[in-house]
Amino acid sequence: MSEQLHDGLKHVAAVIREKNALYLLVDAKRLNAMKASDQTWIKNNFFPELSASGLKKLTRVTNTDIFTQVIVGDFVKLVQENEKISFDLQSFYDRDDALEWLLNDISLSANTL
């Protein structure tokens, strides 16, 4: 799965750059458990590429199982503590909650105009 996952994430990053996307919602509920090497690749390659793209916010909709919680918690902590990563990351179990968080600053900006 690693090569398939990496190719898919490289494509996602390319589309984000091409479209100048600022917000990304990933529904990862059907994603199988990731190997440690895939997690490392995401941290060292995918996240820096997203950061360089100008992305502001990334949210993941995930399962409630303990393994997913640990992996996502590790990703969130990395993003919050790494000064080189310039986007916010949050994880949710519910898609509507994720979308609300993702679009919150858009609503706030519209209200201040």
Image (cartoon, rainbow, N blue to C red):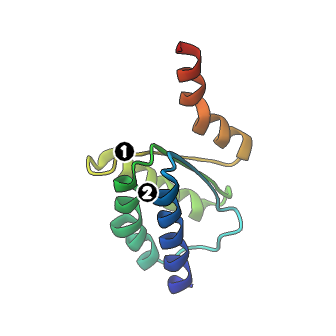
Task: Specify whether 107 is left or right of 2.
Answer: right
104 in relation to 78, above or below = above
Q: Outermost residue, top direction?
A: 112
Q: Count the labels in the image.
A: 2
Q: Quadrant of the N terminus?
A: bottom right
Tell me the residue that label 1 is attached to. Answer: 80
Q: Earlier in the sequence, mark 2 or mark 1?
A: 2
The residue drawn where x is 68% and y is 58% is 63
Specify the amino acid type for callout 2: Asp
Kindly indicate the quadrant of the structure image that contains residue 46: bottom left
Asked whether disc 2 touches disc 1, contact meaning CB atoms under 8 Å apart, the reply is no
The residue drawn where x is 65% and y is 70% is 31
For label 1, the SS is helix
For label 2, the SS is helix
The residue drawn where x is 41% and y is 57% is 50
45 in relation to 97, above or below = below
Mark 1 Cα shell of 10 Å, populated few (<14), some (14-19), many (≥20)? some
92 in relation to 43, above or below = above
Q: Outermost residue, left direction?
A: 83
The image's mark for residue 74 is 2
Q: Position of residue 48 (x, y in %)?
A: 34, 60
Mark 2 Cα shell of 10 Å, populated few (<14), some (14-19), many (≥20)? some
Q: Position of residue 67 (x, y in %)?
A: 57, 65
Q: Cα distance, mark 2 to mark 1? A: 10 Å
Q: Position of residue 41 (x, y in %)?
A: 39, 73
The image's mark for residue 58 is none
Q: Position of residue 112 (x, y in %)?
A: 53, 14
Q: Nearer the viewer, mark 2 or mark 1?
A: 1
Specify the amino acid type for callout 1: Gln
